[in-house]
Image (tube, rainbow, N blue to C red):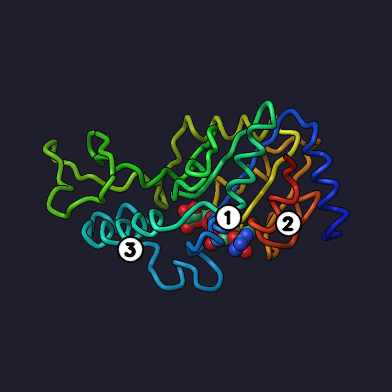
Amino acid sequence: MDEGGAALEAVRERLRDVRSVSALTGSGISAESGLPTFRGAGGLWGTHRVEQLASPDGFASDPQLVWTWYNERRAAHAQVEPNAGHHALARLESSVPDFTLVTQNVDSLHRRAGSRNVLELHGNLREARCNRCADIRPLEGGIAFEDFEHECGGRFRPGVVWFGEALPADVWEAAAAAVTRAEVLLVVGTSGIVHPAASLATHYAAPRALIVEINPEATPLSEYADVVLRGTAAALLPRIVTG
Ligand code: APR
């Protein structure tokens, strides 16, 4: 499983003349940009309460607390840069005829690295959405507490997907279709425990697809991987993406 150089070389070779590739990324790919992951050492869910900050009920009970937290996260995203892992995936996209980047991240770092075909399964923090009329408002400078009330009677909430909410149907369908047709699926920096995102690797990848996990630690997706590269995204992705 973890043959180090031989495995890495095999993946690099496979990516040289491949037609269709998908990548599924999680917060781990942004760790080397300086953003915290959710689980594991220093993870956000180790110091913050998920149900309070990332759920419709939490927002209903204290919208100001939720906006404070998301405005802090937006500010943190703006203060960091995409890392070599993000840039490697953007380079890979330009050399593969059919490349789809499916991310669980809301930090926009893949877009800032130049990736174009990015499916944001869990939304993003570039905009807010009214929870009643679905009106969209850009979030350049965060949102002031006094103006998250919308004249329709609803409230603006961050444009992310919270626990208990459905993923945007069009985004999910495009992600499932892309992974199903991919000859190679790169699974990078995700603990693989949040569904339905994780099911892309366990249930949607084609039997013939080469599944490659890049993660310093084992995850529930490791057993589905044909190749496991135990290391970090910024160190390993540039080594499998040539050119
Ligand atoms: N390179 C690659 N992987 C890394 C790195 C790194 N430098 N650092 C950490 N990792 C791995 C960890 O080993 C872990 O498996 O990244 C993974 C991060 O897992 P989580 O913190 O659970 O993040 P993620 O999988 O993205 O969570 C999924 O959960 O809370 C929700 O909506 C949130 O989108 C998020 C979803």
**Residue 20 x, y percent position in the rendering:** 71, 30
| Disc 1 to disc 3: CB gap under 8 Å | no
Question: Mark 1 to mark 3: distance in Å?
Answer: 25 Å
Q: What's under tag 3, amino acid-wise?
A: Gln
**Residue 39 x, y percent position in the rendering:** 53, 66
Left or right side of 95 for 67:
left
Instruction: Give the mark, 1 or 2, whose residue is nearer the N terminus.
Output: 1
Q: What residue do we see at 40% from left, 63% from top?
A: 50
Q: Tell me the number on the disc at residue 222.
A: 2
Quadrant hosting ligand 1: bottom right
Q: Tell me the number on the disc at residue 52.
A: 3
* Residue placed most toward the observer, 120 or 93: 93
Q: What residue do we see at 34% from left, 57% from top?
A: 75
Mark 1 residue element: helix
In this rendering, the answer to whether 119 lies above or below 140 is: above
Q: Which residue is mark 1?
A: 29
Mark 3 residue element: helix
Q: Tell me the number on the disc at residue 12.
A: none
Question: Mark 1 to mark 2: distance in Å?
Answer: 16 Å
Q: Residues within 10 Å of mark 1 (few under 14, many from 20)?
A: many
Question: Which of the 4 image quarters holds residue 189?
Answer: bottom right
Q: Residues within 10 Å of mark 3 (few under 14, many from 20)?
A: some
* Residue placed most toward the observer, 225 or 7: 7
Mark 2 residue element: helix
